[in-house]
Structure formats: C-alpha cells, structure tokens
Image (cartoon, rainbow, N blue to C red):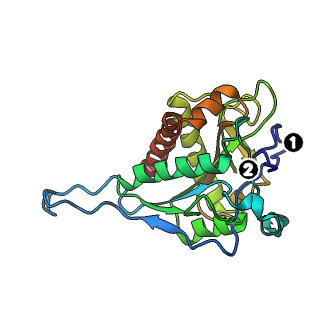
Amino acid sequence: MLLTACSGGETPPSPAAAPTSSAASATPSPSSSSPPPSSSSSPSSSSAVPPVGSGKVVVLDPGHNGGNASHPDEINRKVPAGRGQTKPCNTTGTSTNAGYTEHAFTFAVAHEVGTALAAKGIKVVYTRQNDSGVGPCVDERARIGNDANADAVVSIHADGSTSPTAHGFHVAYSAPPLNAAQGEPSLKLARTMRDGIRDDGFPTSTYIGSAGLSPRNDLAGLNLSTRPAVLVECGNMRNADEASQMSSAAGRAHYAQAIAKAIEAYLAGS
C-alpha cells in the first residue's frame, strides 16, 4: 500500500503543501457527543455552576481514513481547495516504519480529545465516525466545521518526513487570511495550541514552520473554513522516538491530553 506523507517531509516554500483530509459522498453525516447527563446529586439549579464548556462547539477532524487506500478513484477526484485551486479529495496519509498508520493514530487521538472535552460540557462534532471509511473530502471537512458554527476546528495529523533529524510538532493555520475567522481568531487558536502542546513536553518542529507555527496557503480544510481552524501535525511518524510514542496507548493519551487542554484554554479566552 502506497502511503502519502502528510507534509511531504520538507519545509514548504511559501506556505507549502501538506496532504490534509477530506470527504467522500459515501461518508455518513458527522456525529456529535452530548454532555453527560446531570446526576441526581447535582446542586439545585439556583446554585449549579455551568460546565466549563457550556454552549461551546468544537469540531475534531481526524486526518485521512482507513478505506482511502483501497478507493483511489474516490480520493483522487478533484475538489475545491480555496484560493481558486483544486486538490484531490483526500490522501492515504503516512505511517511509522513498522506500519502503524496515521489514519489510525489520528482517529484514536481525536476521540480521546473529544471524550475529554465532552466531559467539560463541550459539544464535540467529528468529521468521520470510523476508521474504515473513505474520506470525507477536504472541502466536506471544512463544511462540517462551518455548518456546526464551531467555536474551534482542530484537524489532527502526523507527518512522514524521511529526513534523519526531522522531529517535533507544528500547528498550521491559513495565511494570508481569507476571512475574519482566519485572522486573529485562528492565529490565537494556533498560538494557544502550540503553547499548550509545547508546555506538555512535546518539542516543536525542527523542519517545518518556526517555533511550532506554520502559516499555510495550500491546505483546503483551512482555506475553506469560516470558523477559527488549525491543523496539528503531532510529530514525525518516521522518527523512531515519536513513532514509538504515537504507537503506544500511553503516548496517544499524552497527545490527546495536551490537545484537549489547549482547546479548553482557547475556549476559556474566546
């Protein structure tokens, strides 16, 4: 199976290309989590404190999908990518040298993030509901965030650079912005996400962007978003240390914890 590295493993020229994820027509409609029901021992309504994320909506976009590689016609069809460009509907993603796939990693991490956010009263919407489907296409993933009127859209990926020293995470955002949400709100989300992941012990990228931030003009999911949106490349799956962490349940839980805390920090200040 041919796997496509998420960001091609090279520093983008201007904002450069990195495969993002997308939607196919066969993909089921997005699902959302509901805040846990109140228990009978909760305080009376007059003294109850609203959940931390009460009224907030977050769209989580796990990159790629498990069925993409076996459906080349569907994922290679061209769809709008913003800025007058088109792109393939989706890509296969990358994997560790041992074969642990990006699509499995992103799906697992996204759902751990969503579980943590839902526990804080935040409504969570996912762009895909399983890891065996095809797509959704990149334009559809953006539409899901827009239609949900999301307070934040976070796309979760991992990279596949073969450069021997390439490691670390980075956060991409749309630049130059195409609308108000892609301006200060997305930049604030990107900075808050970068700070949160870095403060949780993850190193920033040594090979893409600067200090963990990467302005991009070629990522369809960001270009087409009308909500504050970022794409997190959690690390390099071809780096032995990061591959080991991504392949372990404890490592994935650590990534999810850092991303969830960063989203909460952003929502608290927005």
- 186 left or right of 137 in image: left
Amino acid type at circle 2 is: Gly
How much space separates mark 1 and mark 2, taking CA atoms? Answer: 21 Å
- Nearest to N terminus: mark 1 or mark 2: 1
- 56 left or right of 99 in image: left
Q: Residues within 10 Å of mark 1 (few under 14, many from 20)?
A: few
Amino acid type at circle 1 is: Pro
Residue occupying image coordinates x 71% and y 67%: 139
Q: Residues within 10 Å of mark 2 (few under 14, many from 20)?
A: many
Comparing labels 1 and 2, the label whose residue is closer to the camera: 2
Residue occupying image coordinates x 78% and y 53%: 217
Q: Which mark is residue 4?
A: none
Residue occupying image coordinates x 67% and y 66%: 136
Which of 176/102 is in front?
Answer: 102
- Residue topped by disc 1: 13
Disc 1, SS:
loop
Disc 2, SS:
loop
Q: Position of residue 216 (x, y in %)?
A: 76, 49
Residue occupying image coordinates x 74% and y 36%: 209
Residue 253 shows in the view? yes
Q: Which mark is residue 93?
A: 2
Q: Position of residue 142 (x, y in %)?
A: 65, 65
Q: Position of residue 138 (x, y in %)?
A: 71, 63
Q: Up-down: is 138 above or below 268?
A: below
